[in-house]
Image (tube, rainbow, N blue to C red):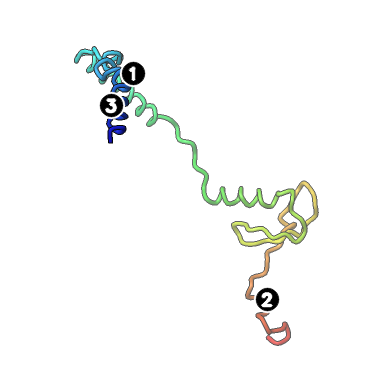
Amino acid sequence: MTTRLITLFVAAWALSTSAPSFSQEFETFPDAEITNDQWQQRVEEARRRSERYVANARTRAVDPLTSDKEEAEASDQRAMNDPSLQRGDIIATSRGFVVFVGRDSDERQASDFLPVPSPRSFPSRGQTAGSR
């Protein structure tokens, strides 16, 4: 018990001697001596800056938004022009799944891709093509 009391006393003494008091910190704060008029001037200047910012934001031209269709077409082109595509690879496009049947060349064409048949066109398990 006495060791706790001594520890608390030493800690309190160390804090009181090493840390400046709140009033000393407040006095070193740059705005501690500001007058009411100076404060009002700062508030008005901040308000004017804010109004200029809002006015500039309203008059700034907005970048034209791309349509969903344009974004989908651009995404399709990126996928179809992927240099790592090999024959038989299937990719997803905005128009469905397509299989790459073309050749390895720099210029891909729409004829290099064929639509993947829908699952309904495949025979179900246990069924053969002739038993439909």
Q: Which of 90 and 26 is in front in this view?
A: 26
State how far apart marks 2 and 1 are (Cα).
83 Å
State how far apart marks 3 and 2 are (Cα).
86 Å
Residue at screen point 42% across, 30% down: 60
- Which residue corresponds to mark 1? 18
Image check: 12 left or right of 82? left
Q: Are marks 3 and 2 in contact (CB under 8 Å)?
A: no
Q: Where does residue 9 sit, x and y in percent of width and height?
A: 28, 26
Residue at screen point 66% across, 48% down: 78
54 w.r.t. 96: above or below: above
- Which residue corresponds to mark 3? 9
Frontmost of labels 2 and 1 is 1
For badge 1, the amino acid type reads Ser
Q: Where does residue 64 sit, x and y in percent of width and height?
A: 49, 39
For label 3, the SS is helix
Q: Which mark is residue 43?
A: none
**Toward which corner of the image does residue 128 lie, by quadrant?**
bottom right
Q: Are marks 1 and 3 in contact (CB under 8 Å)?
A: no
For badge 3, the amino acid type reads Phe
101 w.r.t. 125: above or below: above
Disc 1 crowd rating (10 Å Cα; few below 14, some 14-19, many 20+) is: few
- Which residue corresponds to mark 2? 122
Q: Which residue lies furthest to the bottom in this view?
A: 131
For badge 2, the amino acid type reads Phe
Residue at screen point 67% across, 76% down: 122
Image check: 75 left or right of 48? right
Earlier residue among tags 2 and 1 = 1
Q: Which residue lies furthest to the front in this view?
A: 2
Could you tell me which quadrant the N terminus lies in?
A: top left
Frontmost of labels 1 and 3 is 3
